[in-house]
Image (spheres, helix red, strand yellow):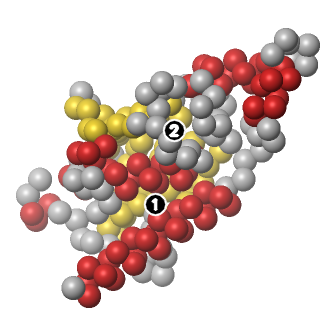
Amino acid sequence: MSARDTPAADTIVTLRIDLVDSDPPIWREVEVPVSMTLKQIHAVVQAAMGWEDYHLWEFAAGYERISASRAAKIQLHALRGPDKTTLAYLYDFGDSWEHRLTFAKLRTADPRLAYPRYVAGEHAAPPEDSGGIFGFYAQLDILADPNHPDHDEIAEWFGDYDPGKFNDQPIKDRLVRIANRRRLSSKSQKAR
């Protein structure tokens, strides 16, 4: 990408986050600046899915793996294609939570809004450390069967988690904190 292909600083894109193999589909849609690094996009995914950033993670663009250390140096606009760009994001190498990130709808940001910004989503994301997508669904089956020998243990571990309840306010709150950190960082860099 040449310097003239670099989008303006106020350019945003819609990011669709899909948790791979979830049924019903667990997804989020947020608007993010294309100037964000992949490390910052990692923070957005963590916020959007309710993850706590306890585990290792990586991105993949085609066959290229992008580790956390490299992700801090790569801005999203450097990876975007002409229409839409899809990246893989793997969180927790043990549980292997696979996400498909789709970036589309490149446009100028609304100066009245702060980014990243939550747009939409459906279904509660699984709790951290619940065994990956297949382990999570196996545990939900146990939770639904009060006669299962592991029911009480799983019920205690899941606590008040309810896969049928989705509250997007914590996502909005977490993304506002990220947007505020970006704004403060931008102001301090301009002051230098």
Note whether residue 81 is visible: no
Counting from the top left corner in percent of width and height, residue 72 is at 27, 52
Where 37 sits versus 98, above or below? below
- Cα gap from disc 2 to disc 1, whole angstroms: 15 Å
State the residue position of label 1: 31
Which three-letter amino acid code belongs to the residue tagged 1?
A: Glu
Q: Which residue lies furthest to the bottom in this view?
A: 191
Proximity of marks 2 and 1: CB atoms separated by less than 8 Å: no
- How many labels were placed on the picture? 2
The part of the image, by quadrant, that contains residue 90 is: top left
Nearer to me, 155 or 123: 155
**Residue bearing the label numbered 2:** 18
User: Which is nearer the eye, 150 or 178?
Assistant: 150
SS under mark 1: strand
Residue at 48 percent across and 24 percent down: it is 94
Circle 1 residues within 10 Å: few <14, some 14–19, many ≥20:
many
